[in-house]
Amino acid sequence: MSDHQDIKIDVARAKSAAVGRENGFTAAELADIEPRVHEIHAILQQERAAKKYGFYDLHKDDVAFADVAAKAEHFRTFGYENLVVLGIGGSALGLTALNTALNTPYFNLQSKRGRRGAPRLFVMDNIDPVTFKAMIKLCPPKKTLYNVISKSGETAETISQLMIVVALLEKAVGAAAMKDHLVVTTSPKGPNAPKSLLHPVADAYSLVSFPIPLNVGGRFSVFSPVGMFPAAMLGMDLDGMRAGCAAMDARCSLDSLEDNPAYLRAAIHYLLDTAKGKTMSVMMPYADGLRDVADWYRQLWAESLGKRKSLDGQDVHTGQTPIKALGATDQHSQVQLYREGPNNKVFNILEAGRFETILKIPDTLKEVPGLGYLRGASMNKLMAAELRGTMDALKASQRPVIRITLPRVNAHSVAQLLYMLEVETAMAGRLHNVNTFDQPGVEEGKIIARRLMGGNG
């Protein structure tokens, strides 16, 4: 079975024929929205050509990928035990999704040989003092590489983490050796580039610094050095990810509602939200490796579509609420609500077409009656049955479902999935007539927090 197969999208269970006209889309409704999709496609392609938004072409940046690979090879020679990423939101969620999907379960508990020589990964995406202090105890500075990620360097959570780390490193290794333990990922330097508070830090300690393209926002940055340098340090298949992005880019560049999976999904979500009352979008992977893709999706969908103002300045207060779940775990915590609670959700079921292992259920516990259906079967078959059972149960309750199948959970297929969801979000934002790429609602809270700390803002 080839590692380079396309992911598949099945929307049959979101159609009116499956869940009724009140809950599913009709062919006529999809046809009505198609002219708008064509218009928006032309706009998005123009903006892409003008490099207004750079996430489309990150996978094509040979220079950036070569730089990431070379620097990772350099730093891996130091034999670090730990890689600590200091970052929040888009600086953390993409890498976390990749790590969960592409590295073995319980990665940090494996021996270094089991990790293929890679360091343990700690993504510090919050400022809980108990958690951060525990990381400090687990990660001696002399055995650790830190990667601080912030486009502006003004993120209070990240810069506070950095201040603690700098003090630890100065004491443990000295200022002169700081360059061997700290890497910066921030906005590029240049006459037309905004200043980053991390630029003087990089200059003071002669640190390796990776640029985040100015036209790439945090939640769209996973295929930039934000995600790719840590991924390279962990030995992930960057070439496979680039190939996966390219494969999905070819599909997502089509001016077609039928053949472009990102546009099809965006249009269906828009219709179900605005015409059918599906104000929430649940992403429910049936594979532990994909659980953090749902977390990454929450930020992407929420920050991009949750807007007060439309592009023409009107108050619209739009946006679906994204929800993460996990099959089969959340069948026992959420599906009761999903089936019998408010019918206001669309469900995105993620499926692994093939797991990397087959685990048989032995012919045992013969003293317990009624277990014949499990004996001699496999966990793989049971997971597939649980997935199908949930989808059939949701259908019986007239809840729309879109099924996404990854042939295997690997670099190629996961990159396809993330790239598709990014393009889908760009189309959905335009359908909702909002600015997909800003987040004004986030900024006010940051300003208030800074004032409460005695800073300016």
Image (cartoon, rainbow, N blue to C red):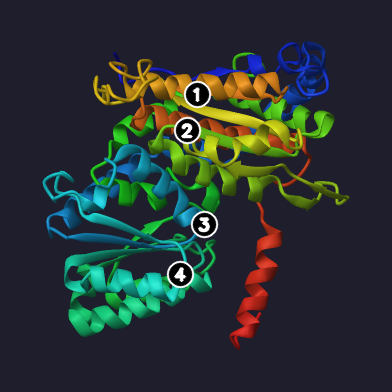
Considering only order in the chain, which callout, 3 or 4, is on the residue closer to the N terminus? 3
| Disc 3/disc 2 C-alpha distance (Å) | 27 Å
Camera-near label (2 vs 4) is 2
| Disc 4/disc 3 C-alpha distance (Å) | 10 Å
Which residue extends farthest right? 314
Q: Check the image and report above or below for 225 versus 204.
A: above
The residue that appears at 46% across and 56% down in the rendered structure is 91
Camera-near label (1 vs 4) is 1
In the image, residue 379 lies at what x, y percent? Answer: 34, 25
Looking at the rendered image, the quarter that the C terminus falls into is bottom right
Asked if residue 228 lies left or right of residue 115, the reply is: right
Q: Is residue 209 visible?
A: yes
Crowd rating for badge 3 (residues with CA inside 10 Å; few <14, some 14–19, many 20+): some
Crowd rating for badge 4 (residues with CA inside 10 Å; few <14, some 14–19, many 20+): many
In the image, residue 406 lies at what x, y percent? Answer: 43, 23
Q: Is residue 251 visible?
A: no
Asked if the residue at tag 3 contacts the one at tag 4, i.e. Cβ–Cβ closer than 8 Å, the answer is no
- Residue corresponding to mark 1: 387
- Residue corresponding to mark 2: 328
- Residue corresponding to mark 4: 158
| Disc 1/disc 2 C-alpha distance (Å) | 7 Å
Looking at the rendered image, the quarter that the N terminus falls into is top left
Tag 3 secondary structure: helix
Identified by mark 3, the residue type is Gly
The residue that appears at 48% across and 48% down in the rendered structure is 221
Identified by mark 4, the residue type is Thr
Camera-near label (3 vs 1) is 1
Considering only order in the chain, which callout, 1 or 3, is on the residue closer to the N terminus? 3
Identified by mark 2, the residue type is Ala
Identified by mark 1, the residue type is Leu
- Residue corresponding to mark 3: 89
